[in-house]
């Protein structure tokens, strides 16, 4: 399994846990959905930043 997939699974677990906790505390569903979308967005951005390949520069010119 690639590092990107592992990172995204971790993000899903964090988002799910926080959504469950917010639901148990009685938060309105719209705010839970907004929070989960924000967490997933930040998780995707972080995963891509951590796992992308560095571009090699051509220094033999």
Image (tube, rainbow, N blue to C red):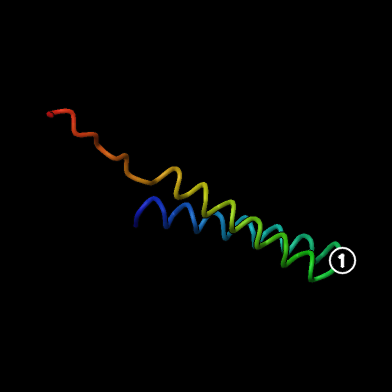
Furthest-front residue in this view: 61
| Left or right, 43 with reference to 53 | right
Q: Residue at x 76, y 60 (%)?
A: 21
Give x and y (percent) for residue 61.
13, 29
Give x and y (percent) for residue 59.
18, 28
Q: Residue at x 34, y 57 (%)?
A: 1
Furthest-left residue in this view: 60
Q: Mark 1: few, some, or many residues within 10 Å (few <14, many ≥20)?
A: few
The image quadrant of residue 15 is: bottom right
The residue nearer to you, when weighing 21 against 27, is: 27
Residue 53 vertical position relative to residue 11 in the rendered view, above or below: above
Residue 51 vertical position relative to residue 2 in the rendered view, above or below: above
The image quadrant of residue 13 is: bottom right
Tag 1 secondary structure: loop
The image quadrant of residue 6 is: bottom left
Q: Residue at x 42, y 57 (%)?
A: 5
Which residue in the structure is indicated by mark 1? 26
Give x and y (percent) for residue 27.
85, 64
The residue nearer to you, when weighing 26 against 51, is: 51
| Left or right, 50 with reference to 38 | left
| Left or right, 2 with reference to 49 | left
């Amino acid at each position: 399994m690639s590092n990107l997939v592992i990172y995204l699974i971790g993000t899903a677990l964090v988002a799910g846990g926080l959504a469950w906790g917010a639901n148990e505390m009685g938060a309105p569903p719209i705010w839970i959905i907004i929070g989960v979308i924000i967490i997933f967005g930040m998780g995707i951005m972080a995963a891509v930043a951590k796992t992308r390949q560095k571009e090699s520069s051509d220094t033999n010119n």
